[in-house]
Amino acid sequence: MMPLAKTPPMGWNSWNTFGWNISEGLIKETAQAFEDRGLKAAGYEYLVLDDCWSLRQRNADGKLVADPEKFPNGMKALSDCLHGRELKFGLYSCAGVLTCAEYPGSFEHEFADAQTFAEWGVDFLKYDYCNRPLNHDGKILYRRMAMALRNCGRDILFSACNWGHHEVEKWIRSSGAHMWRSTGDIVDNWESVKSIAKSQIGKECHGAPYCHNDMDMLVVGMRDNGTFVGGGGCTDEQYRTHFSLWCMMNSPLMIGCDVRNMSDEAQAILTNAELIALNQDPEGRQPYVTRHWDWDDAGAHTFVKPLHDGSYAIGLFNLDDMSTKASVQFWDMGLPVASGYGFKLRDLWAREEVGVVKEGMNMQIDAYSCKVYRAELVKV
């Protein structure tokens, strides 16, 4: 096998917007939009079909069968089409007897299903956690599918989705998975984004190259247009902050909106090359957190992320619904005042140089907003 997922995977998943309303035509149109809207050029490569792609029953040989009404040419033809566009094809299955939508799961069919996926040209498997026999250890089920995928004759990225249960962060890397869900399902509103982001504080040490902490799919650009995750939607400012948090915290970047019809602002957020570069930094180091006040657990959070070239990403986030102060003192990053150094800052949303700053930053941040900088150490 070739090593997979050195950096967080980037792509698109059908579930958030389309649920069961998926088809061959939708995937081909989405692939075209990847090229037309600059997503492929920005680094997004996986197109993942979530639940509801198969028939309700396996065939006489016990194999999964793609729904012929939704996918009249079959999965191999669809994967060939995507590969011809230099994109990658993802499918969904489940560790249970049935999937979450009650289609056939892969429980005790793991090796046969992995072989089927390989024959179809699948590059990515999202593996859910519904309807498993409760007397079976979830760790064993993920180890089993990981083993099957690693011996199926094809490189298939393994996306483990057990929703953060059973302290998954402590054992999933050793199972062989390449990314692992650490949360329940995201909803397209600010409270969901905020709750997920805050739930990751303290789990930073568990994400690393080849096995990434998945904070669930992006809701950027959905505008409450989703089959299952509509929750009122977010503003463009909230979507910018959402995307910044996922980039800073090294989550896989899996788009959930209908990219064929996304707004220009959503496209600009999702293709911000300088934010994506933080997410895709080859060292894959997680950020650490500082706060404006020791007792402040609700509003201002500052994330600091070491980058491979010696620079740092600094993100000042206001997760509250009112303007607040956010700060970072450079000595908290390890830079003493007497060192003779400061940081040359670049604002990654404004895409402009800020200048050299000594000792620290302290600024007012609007509600739901953020400032993200790339900081280069320089003599002052």
Image (cartoon, helix red, strand yellow):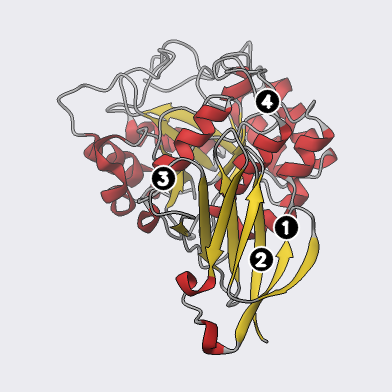
Give the quadrant of residue 375: bottom right
Q: Position of residue 330 (x, y in %)?
A: 53, 72
Q: Label 2 near label 1: C-beta < 8 Å?
A: yes
Left or right: 353 with respect to 135? right
Viewer can see residue 330: yes
Q: Position of residue 353 (x, y in %)?
A: 79, 67
Distance in Å between CA atoms under marks 2 and 3: 22 Å
**Disc 1 to disc 3, C-alpha distance:** 23 Å
**Is residue 209 positioned above or below 267 on the image?**
below
Look at the picture and state if 380 lies above or below 170. below
Q: Can you identify the residue that label 2 sits on?
A: 374
Is disc 4 placed on a helix, strand or loop?
loop
Going by the numbered disc 3, the residue's amino acid type is Gln
Mark toward the start of the polypeptide (1 vs 3): 3
Q: Residues within 10 Å of mark 2 (few under 14, many from 20)?
A: many
The image shows residue 330, relative to residue 50, as above or below, that is: below
Nearer-the-camera pick, 152 or 214 = 214
Please name the residue shown 79% across and 58% down the image.
Answer: 351
Residue holding disc 4:
222
Q: Quadrant of the C terminus?
A: bottom right
Residue type, label 1 = Leu
Picture quarter with the N terminus = bottom left
Query: In the rendered structure, which amino acid carries the disc numbered 2?
Result: Arg
Q: What residue did someone put label 3 on?
A: 200
